[in-house]
Image (spheres, coloured by chain):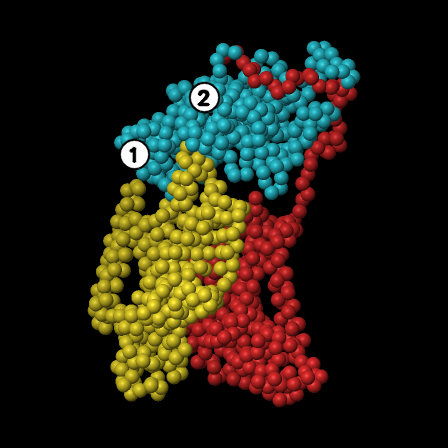
Amino acid sequence: MSEYNPNVPPKKKPFSLQLDVAKFEPATDEEKAQQDVMRESTTFFRDGMRKLFRNPLAVGSMIVLIVILVTIIIAPLIVPYSYSNMITVNGKRDKSAKNLPPFTYSKLEQQAIDNGEKIFPHIFGTDELCRDYFIRVIYGARVSLAVGFFASLIVLFIGLLYGSIAGYAGGKTDLVMMRIVDIIYSLPDTLMVILLSVVLDQLLGQRLQNTVLASIGPNMLSMFAVFGLLYWVGMARLVRGQILTIKNNEYVLAARAMGAKRSRIIRKHILPNCMGVIIISTALQIPSAIFTESFLSFIGLGVQAPMPSLGSLANSARAALQAYPYKMVFPAVGICLIVLSFNLLGDGLRDAFDPKLRK
Amino acid sequence: MDITERKRKERQLIVHTVVSLAIFAAGWLFLPILTEKILLGVVLVLIAGALYFSNNTGRYVCKRVLLALLTVFIISAITFFAMNAIPGGPFSKEKAPSAAVQAVLEERFHLNEPVGKQFILYLEGLMQGNFGVSTKTGREISTTIFDSFSISAQLGGYAALLAVVLGVLFGSIAALNRAKAADRIIIFFTTLFVAVPSFIMATLLLLVFCLQLNWFPIFSADNQSYVLPVVALMLSPMSYITRLTKTSMLDVLGQDYIRTARAKGVSQWLVIFKHALRNALIPVITYVGPMTAYILTGSMVVESVFTTGGLGTKFVQGITNRDYPMIMGTTIFLATLMVTATLLSDLVYKLVDPRIDFD
Amino acid sequence: MSEMPLLQVKNLHTSFFTDAGEVKAVNGISYNLDAGKVLGIVGESGSGKSVSAYSIMRILTDTGRVTGGEVLFKGENILNYTPQQMQKFRGSRISIIFQDPMTCLNPTFSIGSQLREAIRIHTDRNKEQIQARAVEMLQLVGVNEPERRLRQYPHELSGGMRQRVMIAMALACEPDILIADEPTTALDVTIQAQILELMQSLQKKLGMAIIMITHDLGVIADMCDEIIVMYGGKVCERGTADEIFYNPRHEYTKGLIRSIPRISEKHEKLVPIAGSPVDLLNLPKGCAFAARCDHAMKICLEQPPEEIRVNDFHIAACWNNVRRMMEDGQLEVKDGEEV
């Protein structure tokens, strides 16, 4: 062996320091412990929430959604107009209130104001049937959000049930169940929605009259039916995948070895661990349902008139696009804002709670 | 491969060939109503079955093609029976616009036959490119479809091409400039575009660039400017691809094999465009199927807004007019296109990514 | 000093700039490597051993940056190289193989295409010559049926095979130095021995220098000429393999040696090192190991120890050595006196 050549000198001469003999006594454990800087420990949930609230986009979209929600709940209580009926002045139907620009009054209303009456302003103006446009947009947003929400719930319910059965049962059951999912998955969803809407519209249209469901309209029902029939497969796949991964984890094995019941394992171990992914996916399902609804409204398969939705409002605004472009702007901005907020919130939730993205 | 396994495979091959030939013969004898095209289809399936045994790739391709054929069949069945269920639907004798159409319908759909037979006859017609006759115009639907589809195909083709090229480009730029200005600008706009439904995008483009700025003429027979419809169709899938490419590019750039390539002395440029992009594009390939579906359905609304006279326009007209044979024909035609696109993108995906286990 | 060493690392500092703050992964390490020698770098996860190697190759991730020091290859500071110069340098003068052969080969290119690329970049051979060289390299690292293997994709090969391919790729351009970053950690024990043997025989055959990075002292015991023990991004101790094994002068090294299982001494308990690795985000002001050290003194918590020469073959950075020297009377210190 060649002579060790220490030709890399230590950066300083070793003892050009002030040395204190007293310091060469053994250090106590407490002194050592001070050195061991511990990072604060947090739970998965709290850590995720902290991350979520640190994400300005997610917080912003949450605020936007809350503002929208509060508005659509409170506004109909304040605004004295109805979404379906003509504006009336002193009990008389006001036919002069057609296509008013925002914050203007019709001749009749102007007269009433001159007489000292108070008339609530038309914040977004009025439409071609002399209805207050603001309240229609508000109801449109209600309908769109409700559609998105219920469609997502349907998807969540069926998908969760189907996926967890397939995932937990495994084996042949799983194989057969997933083959069915594969086939449904390969059907083009939008086309099927259109087709079923056309059919159900004709089939249900007559029978629904004078029932509670009439105001929702056959098109909305058919959309829910389609979501129930087709859209759940994505969720089912997701849930099954999650369960398969978790099922094979050691802690589930340990629970089983200790004699835990199946139901307990599902409740205590599997569901809590795949909840995050499922919630994120449900949150992202809402804008997709709102998209589908607005698309159907556009091709004339939307909610039953006079019930408005943001999609149908935007669609009817197209007819007089050049004359009244603002009528397009309000529902369009509404849809984009809602969809954008849900997308950003979903992204934020994913960044905060998806364990796979954790560094 | 050891000898016993080879023997087993050989035996399997013989058994399956015999079974296939038996099915073929049975089809020949008992199903005389099948046309040459169905027979051709059966032959294709048999060839596929034969390939089944040679290697994994062939086997996967066959399975996938069979699944696609099955999907098209299921879609046709759903379409036919759903339409058949409508009272006053395309097949009722009471509600035909004219005696001539009535006669053609009678002949075409063999309305006196049982439903099952009608379906087989309808399928047979489909195989020969016979989609029936419009109840509205009395024209052959196949002619309408093939005439109008050339416009839609051009629009959709440009949109798909631009979406992929620009999406991959912007996605790569965003990934390589992570957290810099270019990344933020790209992500801002793509997040925005994803949240705008295509009909609103189309309407806004029409309003701003056609009606207000007069940059582009309104679409007409002699004034076929594709720019605005293509842009309206393209923005959303492009944004999606951008985000997809960015995510997968960042993922790939963090992989060990990229470090290996750099350590070998591969230039930065080659690392990105050879080693990283090839892997980063795999998710984009899988998106081509859904993108085709998105563009085809999107073209319904975009074409209606710009009144291009393409297939989308005709479909929406068919829905508005409750022209059932037209809806059926178009649905099946579009669905077949979508299924084919998904099939192709799946196959390319498996070929590009050698890791995929073909079982 | 007879000749200039092949590689000189002087006071190297590397940090990662993350959202949480500056992670100081390497905090001033220095060593030399002579041509044809084997240097072992030992330390646990997060001790900065891999990062120091990536700093030399300049293949740190985006957030990582060399914040100080020099890396001299044959007297030239390669940290000053332009990206183009660095490209030519990597793979031809210094090569590296990584820990996990499962993920280090590009899954979408065949073995051959990746091996040929490594050869093509640094030589001007024609296609046939490159192919021949690729086959030759695979034979050299003991891969059977090289022609067929070249057409295969990484997922079709076993872990050991892939690591052999990585070695072939690294050695294809006859580099002066091969950095092996935990080359056997991800492999089965039986394969580990094969790969180590292969590396040893290749080193004898080709005569390149090797920097062997590992967390397992046992792995490199009889392979290395010199060993560096790292902790918290600093050198604890460096010296010849014999010195490190039989005369360890740093508490951390002693801990590492105690934690190697031995067959010879019966009934001896394996002693793990208590505590967890130092947090590189908040480095303590004293010795990084002090919190886990059984012999920590007050000074250890306050002042970082300097590297002190124990003998001609051995340097250690531990205050206990100073204490020992004071006790032995080699060093007389009075209170507060400057030495």
- Residue pictured at 46% horizontal, 53% vertical: B242
Q: In this view, does B48 lie above or below B300?
A: above
Q: In this view, does B209 lie above or below C210?
A: below
Q: Residue B48, how many percent across, how many down?
A: 27, 56
Q: Chain C is which colour? A: cyan
- Residue at the spot 44% in from the left edge and 24% down from the top edge: C177
Q: In the shown orientation, is residue B250 left or right of residue B86? A: right
Q: Which chain is yellow?
A: B
x and y percentages locating residue C327 in the rendered image: 72, 13
Q: Mark 2 lies on which chain?
A: C
Image spot of residue C278 (x, y percent): 64, 33
Between residues C289 and B207, which one lies in front from this camera angle?
Answer: B207
Q: Which of B19 and B59 is in front in this view?
A: B59
In the picture of the structure, the residue carrying the numbered disc 2 is C209
What amino acid is labelled 2 in the image? Ala
Question: Left or right: B6 with respect to A331?
Answer: left
Chain containing mark 1: C
How much space separates mark 2 and mark 1, taking CA atoms? 29 Å
Snapshot quadrant of residue C128: top left
The relative height of residue C157 versus residue A134 in the rendered view (above or below) is above
Query: Which chain is drawn using red?
Result: A
Q: Callout 1: helix, strand or loop?
A: helix
Front of the two marks 2 and 1: 2
The mark found on residue C147 in the picture is: 1
Residue B262 image-quadrant placement: top left
Q: How busy is the neighbourhood of tag 1: few (under 14 within 10 Å), some, or many (20 plus)? A: some
Give residue A199's position: percent from left, percent from top. Answer: 42, 77
Disc 2 with disc 1 on a shared chain: yes
Q: Who is closer to the viewer here, B138 or A228?
A: B138
Residue at point 48% right, 73% down? Answer: A321
Q: Is residue B67 visible?
A: no
At mark 2, the secondary structure is strand
